[in-house]
Amino acid sequence: MNKTSKRKVPFLQGSLDALCGVYCIVNVVNLIKPLSKPQSKVLFGEIVCQVDQQAMQLQNCLLEGLSLKVMKKLLHATLSGYAIVWHIPYAGKRNPSLNAFWLSMQAFLEEGGRRCILLRLTGTNDHWTVVKSISQQQLNLYDSDNLQRISRMHCSTEATAADKAHMLWPAQCIFIRSN
């Protein structure tokens, strides 16, 4: 090999697709109503079929990711079968401060029962992830891209905060719990 040639690196899961939204739904179900690996594969296939059947332009969803509109359709079609309910508390509302948003996520997760939050991130990652717990300092994740935690000091809910690594989108944040 020529010394000037660069070493090729293999593509990793997610390098060429934008399936984090599909994985998030499977991960939500696994947190709230644990499934075996074969059951999880079946659920994954069902969600991909839902994307295709609902004329959501499968290719676009696989390459560009899932919008909130598509995520809502998929959650509606999928989660009711598992006795899981969800709502979007900030839909149509003014963006809260990071502190107010953080406190509302903490309060929801601390109410008891099996709960999690489906969260939309941009910035360092353009990504859907699942928040399984939260402290004053960080979000603890159950994530398809192996993210484990996000520090509060690196987050913002203000689109103008260019110095922050993670933009959190409250209006696209989905609170999920067992029914």
Image (cartoon, grey):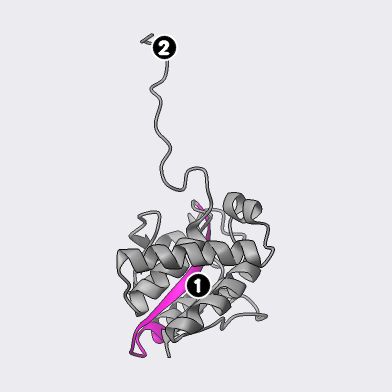
Label 2 sits on residue: 4
Which range is magenta?
107-123
Q: How many marks?
A: 2
Residue 59 x %, y %: 63, 51
Residue 57 x %, y %: 68, 57
Q: Nearer the viewer, residue 161 or 73?
A: 73
Residue 15 x %, y %: 47, 43
User: In the displayed structure, would residue 103 be above or below residue 23?
Assistant: below
Visible residue check, residue 105: yes
Q: Secondary structure at mark 2?
A: loop
Residue 112 inside the magenta-drawn segment? yes
The amino acid pointed to by label 1 is Leu
**Which quadrant would residue 69 be assigned to in this image?**
bottom right
Label 1 sits on residue: 98
- Say left or right for 111 vs 46: left
Q: Which mark is residue 169?
A: none
Residue 6 inside the magenta-drawn segment? no
The residue at the far top in this view is 2
Residue at 34 percent across and 84 percent down: it is 114
Residue at 46 percent across and 69 percent down: it is 25
Question: Mark 2 or mark 1: which comes first in sequence?
Answer: 2
The amino acid pointed to by label 2 is Thr
- Say left or right for 2 vs 77: left
Residue at 34 percent across and 62 percent down: it is 149
User: In the displayed structure, would residue 117 be above or below residue 38?
Assistant: below
Residue 49 x %, y %: 56, 63
